[in-house]
Image: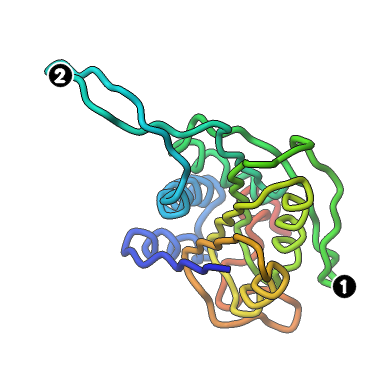
């Protein structure tokens, strides 16, 4: 597994505002979208391309186009849905699948409750969107779900991550072609599995359902 932690002042700035408990949901959603676009730029560095002929106003030259089959982007519901617009803003030709996963707050283990994905992912580059890499259980399960359908090249994009989650995904994906791109690597997990310092529950903050 390859880990890439974004090192850019704009990423750090936007994350700082996301972390602030006073940031309202509309601002949080917009900043998350912008941040995902920045992270997607790094995550798609090795997207597959083909050469194409381009006729400019001056001459003919050679350019690049995203190759077929097109990349598949898979937000993990529900919070990952808030990252989708930021990704497709950069890669509008990407196809979209959905994977619904929830964490059992007692066992901290993931359960899958819905999926809408192609049956055969052979030859597809897949990009998984999950705001928080905390325990790593949901992301590891999502990656394995894609691999079981034939995916051999999976990149995950997360806003923030805990070292424990990174280690868990690395262990679970040993031998697989997996890259994880994150906006920041935080300090640790607390006793209930939340990232510290973190930004709270990303789903609640995206959709305004904080209790």
Secondary structure at numbered mark 2: loop
Kindly report which numbered mark, 2 or 1, lies closer to the viewer in this rendering.
Answer: 2
Q: How many marks?
A: 2
- Residue 182, above or below 44: below
> Which quadrant: the C terminus?
bottom right
Quadrant of the image occupied by residue 12:
bottom left
Q: Residue at x 77, y 60 (%)?
A: 141
Element at label 1: loop
Of the pair 153 and 192, the residue shown nearer to us = 153
Judged left or right of residue 167, residue 107 is right
Q: Please report the residue visible at 62 percent of the width from the left and 41 percent of the height from the top.
A: 124
Tell me, for residue 59, which label it has, or none: 2
Residue at the spot of label 1: 106
Residue 64 x/y as whole percent: 35, 33
Measured as percent of width and height from the top left, residue 147 is found at 73, 53
Please tell me which residue is depicted at 68% across the width and 74% down the height of the picture.
194
Q: What is the x, y in percent for residue 72?
A: 61, 39
What residue appears at the point 37 percent right and 63 percent down from the top-left corner?
13
Q: Nearer the viewer, residue 2 or 29?
A: 2
Q: Nearer the viewer, residue 59 or 116?
A: 59
Q: Position of residue 100 (x, y in %)?
A: 78, 47
> Which circle's residue, 2 or 1, is located before the other in the chain?
2
């Amino acid at each position: 597994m390859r880990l890439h932690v974004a090192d850019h002042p704009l990423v750090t700035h936007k994350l700082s505002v996301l972390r602030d408990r006073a940031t309202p949901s509309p601002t949080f959603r917009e900043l998350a979208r912008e941040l995902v676009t920045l992270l997607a730029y790094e995550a798609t560095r090795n997207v597959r391309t083909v050469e194409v002929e381009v006729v400019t106003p001056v001459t003919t030259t050679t350019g690049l186009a995203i190759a077929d089959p097109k990349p598949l982007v898979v937000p993990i519901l529900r919070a990952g849905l808030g990252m989708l617009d930021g990704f497709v803003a950069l890669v509008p030709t990407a196809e979209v699948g959905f994977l619904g996963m929830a964490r059992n707050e007692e066992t901290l283990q993931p359960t899958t409750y819905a999926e809408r994905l192609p049956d055969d992912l052979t030859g597809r580059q897949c990009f998984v969107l999950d705001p928080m890499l905390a325990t790593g259980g949901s992301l590891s399960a999502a990656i394995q779900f894609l691999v079981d359908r034939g995916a051999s090249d999976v990149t995950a994009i997360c806003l923030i991550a805990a070292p424990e989650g990174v280690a868990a995904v690395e262990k679970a994906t040993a031998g697989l072609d997996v890259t994880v791109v994150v906006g920041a690597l935080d300090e640790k997990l607390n006793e209930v599995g939340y990232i510290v310092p973190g930004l709270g529950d990303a789903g609640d903050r995206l959709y305004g359902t904080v209790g």
